[in-house]
Structures are given as structure tokens and as C-alpha cells.
Image (cartoon, rainbow, N blue to C red):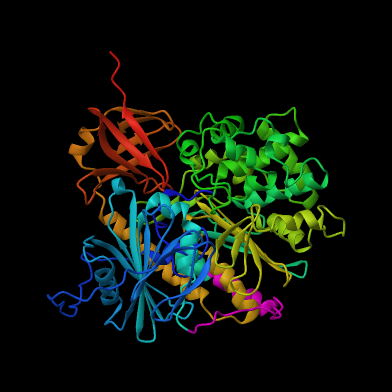
Amino acid sequence: MHRPAAVAALCLTLSACASGPRSAEALLLQHPTATSTPAPTPAGPAVPTSAAPAVPAPASETLAADTLRTMPGGATFTAPSGWTVTTREASVLLEPPEKDTRVVLVDVGTAADADAAVAAAWKAADPAMQRKLQLATPGPGRDGWEELRSYTYETSPNEKRTVYAMALRAGGAWTVILVDGTNATLERRDAPTGLLIGSLRPKGYARESFAGKKPHPLDAARVEAMRSFVDRSAKELEVPGVGFSLIQDGKVVFEGGVGVRELGKPQKVDADTLFMAGSNTKALTTLLLARLVDAKKLAWEQPVVQVDPSFKLGDADTTSRVLVKHLICACTGMPRQDMELYFEYENATPASSMKLLGTMQPTSKFGEVFQYSNLMAAAAGFVGGRLLYPNRELGAAYDAAMDSQVFKPLGMTDTTFDFARALRRNHASPHGWDVDGRTVVEKMDLNYEVVPMRPAGGVWTSVRDLSRYVQLELARGALPDGKRLVSEENLLARYAPQVSVGEDVTYGMGLGVDRTSGATVVHHGGGIFGYHSDMLWLPEAGVGAVILTNADSGAFMLGAFRRRLLEVLYDGRPEAEEDVKARAQSLRTTIQRARERLTLPPDPEAVRALAPRYHSDALGDLAVRTGRDGRTIFDLGEWSTAVATRKEEDGSLTFVSIEPGNVGTEFVVTNREGRRALVVRDEQHEYVFDEVAPER
């Protein structure tokens, strides 16, 4: 559901191997090792001072559909619909409709190494580029590229901008990707940017495909291959505990765990250990809706306002166009906008969350791009719950609906939305990094923010229980005894593509469908503070799996787990193990580099310059206080965090949260009309905490 600040800080850019929404597990390879100075620019050929012959202006074209294109040097890629493409002699410039962001693909040809290739690419595309290189890191070659190195450049939070590059080598030739764009557009156009970068392949390369291949049986040796992979990956990424299961031909062939429920305690993870499953809740919510469609209490194509007249978005036109199927399709143009609840959830309720949805505006056209909205997904569950239990409070109605329509029929006896119930039982504690990169137990406090919007990500479950749900999906709606819980038609309607997420990846209703390997993989991930998870199934192969982890670093296991399962089933190229090692190294390096930029304890002069209290109409009150250990604390009521300071390249100053699970939230110091203020941003929104005048 949510990306904790520490994870989000690692997810500013797109991996060349990734397509689809920006997710931590797909993006870590883009975040590089610390270097202090930019790569040297190689000496280029002398430029003649005499007048050069006139060169025709490059042709530009705005595309009406996703289009396969070939670079001057022969590499191929898919250019996204609605983007403008300008082809030059050795490069291709691509711009989204906003025109404030550019992606340049450059055929560099031969170069001494990746550093030299990137320097040459910047010289060709933007000779004035002078940004300091923040990080550079290698990644494993994939999709025909034999070598990959990624670069991230310094930007100030006030710029609201991201700049990065990626060098890819095939044979002796280098191709470089340069990205310079606003954070708002890069998030809004996340999926098409992922399509563009993820589809870039060397000339003549054919993707590995498992289409038409028969999967191997998950016998004892292959189950052990998966178990040992999970165990090694957890150790590599310092994930204390992992629960996982494997399913084939309707039967669970393995369910269990590795590691411990909490660091420093002996209790082991097993098949019944409860974890928070985050956004995997969304698919369970759409299963509820599918049963309601079967019962003719609503229809997928029905306007939501007909089902629930109180439903309202900030934009009247979008409100009127939202059908039931759109509530959880991430396709209405409503953006991820979680900070209002993240900062101010103590008194929030499902009703207030739905009221908050009515203040939010779409930031892209209806159906144009994938944009993830947790509050829209929450509305789906609350609308369904109210239909069954109209006289109950919204949250209670949803809980009862899920219990009666989903959990009890499936035998998911331990699955719950009740924190108190879960925490009394066999449960895994959340873990994250401290400011120095050590894995520690996180406070549970921040996860209570999901309670008022729990249909989007609030479920507690175990691998045993969630496997029963995956079995239902593989059985196309039938229970183990042959009785039908939901019609095949309405179960599969949830898979139907509502919006493109990347190359051969689409998003339906709380479920993604990925065909990049030639084998259809239906899955969804989940992330909340200290927990990351995934569930997947291959309908044609009759195979499914669940993985639940109790650490923020577990996010970087998920894609590799899916890949390893395909390797085991189809004798795929061994890539998953190398991916985990590369991501673990990048994670450690990124955290180390981020720590080097912080001043801790914070700059005393900067602390003295702070106001005692601040207020934001959207995010509530912030008090500055000194903790018993002498640390400077930003206290926001629902949660508080110790802070460090960081001086930015543009001379501005930022206070940075250092609390485990919340490392990296930025409070930028500013001044408004002579009053002190702090600015907090997500990619598309800005919130201001203004100084509160002292009482007289």
C-alpha cells in the first residue's frame, strides 16, 4: 500500500530491467555507489570554427499509440502513446505531454567504460550539464545488455526534479539513457517511462520466453531450491523473517517460513505467522465486489454514484464517469496522495477518509496512465460493505462483509483487520533501517494510519490463509469441495486490462497481469511500514505462490522471488540470485551515501532558528522539542521523529527524519511573508507548515 520514506528515497528513478509502476523491488538497481565528482568528460574531436553546412531540423512526431522504434544504431524500444519523439543523428529525444521532462536515448558507440559513455552522452545531449554526481552503481546485465551502470545526480528538494542516467553495453557499443524531469511528471508518467526504458534492447536481441513450455513439477528438489533461495535472500537483505508457500495443481506443496518473527527473540516464522499484507488487500476487496456482482447488487459497468450517491471526487466530471470497475483500476487520473492520512490519522475514520477523497483532483486524463490511489481503492471496499450492511458504520460494514463473503468461505480463519487481535497472536514484528543502515524493530504506530482506509491495505494474514485465496484464483472461483464461491466470469473480469502499466503488463481491478516472460503471471504486491509481500499465480500452469516479509528491505526480494519461481519451473536463465546480491549492495551503498550527507546531531544554529510550533491545514500541528536524550524532535502527535540536517546544493537547508521506518521524510526550511515555515512534499503535492505565533 505505502512506500515507507526510506524505501521511497531509493525509488526516485526507473530500472532498465523494470516496466510498470515504480516499485522498490524493481528500482533499486538504479541507485548507485557514492562518488564525489562527475565522471571525466573525454576529449572529443575538435569543432571547426568555420561555418558548418546547414543541417535540416530533426523531425518530431507526437505518437497516437505505443510504437516500436529503432534507434540510429539499431537498438529497439517502445515509444509511449502521447509522447513526442525527435530523432537526431545518433540520439532520440522523447518528451511527455507536459514538456517539462525529457528522456534522451544516445548511441555512444565505443567508449573506454560506462563513465566515459555517460560523459559523452551528456556532452552530446546537454553540454551545459554541470550537476554533481551523487551515486553511480553497477547492475547485472539483462535483456541482451552485457553491462549496466546507473548514475544519480544531485538535485535540491526545492527543484522538485530528478536527474539520472544509465549506461548499457552490448558487445563493444554503449547506449545511454538520460532522464531529466520534474518529480510530478515522472510519477504521473511512471508507467510510460518504465515502458520506454524497460523495452530498450540491443539490435537483434530476442527475449527469453516460456510460452508453450510445460512447467516442471514442484518436487522436493525444486521446493528446496525455492526454500534455500528465500533463506539466502533474506540473509543477504537482512530480512529477519519470511513466510512463503508454493501451490501446484490445486495443492499446497509447501508452506512455512525462514527466520524469526522479531530480531533478538527466538520465535520462528511458520505458516501461521501473521504479517500485514498491504496492498494485497485490494484483490481481496475486488473478490468481495465480484460476489456482489454475482448477486446483482451492483454491476462492473454501473456508475458508482448510482450505487452510492454520497461518492464524490474533487472533480465533478471524473466523479460522474467513475464506474464500479474504475474504483480500483488506478486509471481515473487520481494520484497517490497519502500524506493527509500519514500525518493526520489519529482521529480519521472511514467516513472522513471518503470526505477527504472529495477534495482531491485528478492529475491526468481519465484512462490515460496508471496512477495508484489508495483512497479510491478504499472507496471500493466501503461501497461494497455498505451494500451488505447499510446500517453499520462504514468500517464495521466492510469488516463484516469481508468476513462473511471472503474470509469464512475460504477458511481464512486467522485473517483479520483487527490490530489488537493480530498482535495477541503469532505475528511478525515490523523492521526497518535506522539512520546508519542497521536493521532494527520498527514501531507499529505508523501502520495504524491504514485503519481508516483498510480496504486498500489493512489486512493481517498468514501464508496458510493467503494460499487458500490463491487456490481459489487458480480454481477460477471454485472451492476445494467443488462448490463455487464466485462465478468464473466475474472472477476473471478482475484480470481484464483497465490501463497499461508497461511492456506486456496491464492492471485490472486490484490485480496486475504480466506477460513479459511469455507465461502469464497474475500478481499483486503489498508494502506498509516494516512489511512487504507478494502473491502470484500462473493460471495456465496451475502454479501459485505467496511471500510475506517483516522488513522494509523485503521489498527487494519480491521481484527476485517471482523470477526464481519461473527459473525453477521452466529452467530459466539463473538471474534471481544475482539480482538480490546487486540490490543488497545498492541498498547498503545508498543508505551509506545518504548518511554521509546528514549532520547529526543537527546543526545547532539551524535548530535555534526553528519556530517552536508550526501548523498545516492539511497535515496538522508540528511541535519542535528536545528529547530526553538531547535529540531534536519533530512531534506531529500521531508520530514523532528525531531529525538531522542536510545542506542542499542550492544553499537551502532540510531537516530529515531519522526514525526507523520513517528515515528520509524531508522538511525544507523556508520563509513566507516574514514567517518561518517548513515544506513537505510528495511527488505531486506540496504542504506548508507555517509558524504559529506564541500565545500572549
Q: Is residue 407 visible?
A: no
The residue at the point 26 percent across, 56 percent down is 596
Give the side of residue 83 with respect to residue 475, left or right.
left
Image: 27 above or below 210: above
Give the side of residue 291 with respect to residue 546, left or right.
right
Report the residue that reaches farthest toward the left: 49
Report the residue that reaches farthest toward the bottom: 171
Q: Considering depth in this image, is 429 or 16 the residue closer to the camera?
A: 16
Image: 336 above or below 136: above
Counting from the top left corner in percent of width and height, residue 109 is at 32, 82
Image: 90 above or below 376: below
The residue at the point 34 percent across, 76 percent down is 90
Q: Considering depth in this image, is 601 or 407 the residue closer to the camera?
A: 407
Q: Is residue 25 visible?
A: yes
Quadrant of the image occupied by residue 319: top right
Counting from the top left corner in percent of width and height, residue 72 is at 39, 78
Q: Considering depth in this image, is 345 or 521 the residue closer to the camera?
A: 521
The residue at the point 28 percent across, 50 percent down is 156
Give the side of residue 631 with respect to residue 1, left or right.
left
Quadrant of the image occupied by residue 148: bottom left
Tell me, yes or no, whether the highlighted magenta stretch contains residue 141: no
Counting from the top left corner in percent of width and height, residue 6 is at 41, 52
Report the residue that reaches farthest toward the top: 696
Q: What span is colored magenta in the figure?
A: 204-231
Image: 640 above or below 140: above
Count of marks placed on residues: 0
Tell me, yes or no, whether the highlighted magenta stretch contains residue 229: yes
